[in-house]
Image (cartoon, rainbow, N blue to C red):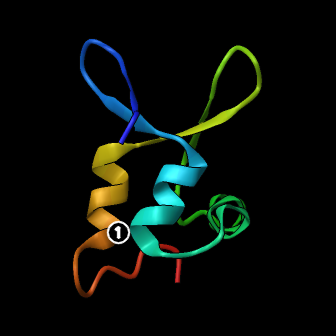
Amino acid sequence: MASTSTAAETLYTPSEVASLFRVDPKTVTRWAKQGRLTPIRTLGGHRRYRAAEVEQLLKPGSTRGE
């Protein structure tokens, strides 16, 4: 995946998160509005999501925000 990385963390785009969960990118945006994911805004206003947080949600039995 072509993710953006900073010195200490990897960030995913909504499309990258959606492909991991096999959902539409709009669903990822809804999850962020519901509090399931915490978006980071770029200077251009785009959303990015921390890889660690996404990977935590991918674990079986994870129910954050439900």
Seen from the viewer's position, the closer of residues 24 and 60 is: 24
Residue position marked by numbered label 1 in the rendering:
57
Q: Judge from the rendering whether residue 62 lies leftward or rightward of residue 65; answer left or right.
A: left
Q: Which residue is rendered at x = 64% and y = 58% of the image?
A: 32
Q: Judge from the rendering whether residue 59 lies leftward or rightward of residue 17; answer left or right.
A: left
Q: Judge from the rendering whether residue 21 lies leftward or rightward of residue 61; answer left or right.
A: right
Residue 37: image x %, image y %?
52, 57
In which quarter of the view is residue 64 placed?
bottom left
Q: Which residue is rendered at x = 63% and y = 67% of the image?
A: 31
Seen from the viewer's position, the closer of residues 47 and 16 is: 16
Quarter occupied by the N terminus: top left
Q: Which residue is rendered at x = 62% and y = 63% of the image?
A: 28
Up the image or down, 4 lies above or below 60; here it is above
Seen from the viewer's position, the closer of residues 20 and 31 is: 20
Residue 11: image x %, image y %?
41, 34
Residue 25: image x %, image y %?
66, 61
Up the image or down, 57 lies above or below 41; here it is below
- What crowding class fits label 1: few (fewer than 14 Cα within 10 Å), some (14-19), or many (20 or more)? some
Helix, strand or loop under label 1: helix
In which quarter of the view is residue 54 placed?
bottom left
Numbered circles on residues, count: 1
Identify residue type, mark 1. Answer: Leu
Up the image or down, 22 lies above or below 30; here it is below
Residue 5: image x %, image y %?
35, 22
Q: Which residue is rendered at x = 65% and y = 70% of the image?
A: 24
Up the image or down, 44 lies above or below 29; here it is above
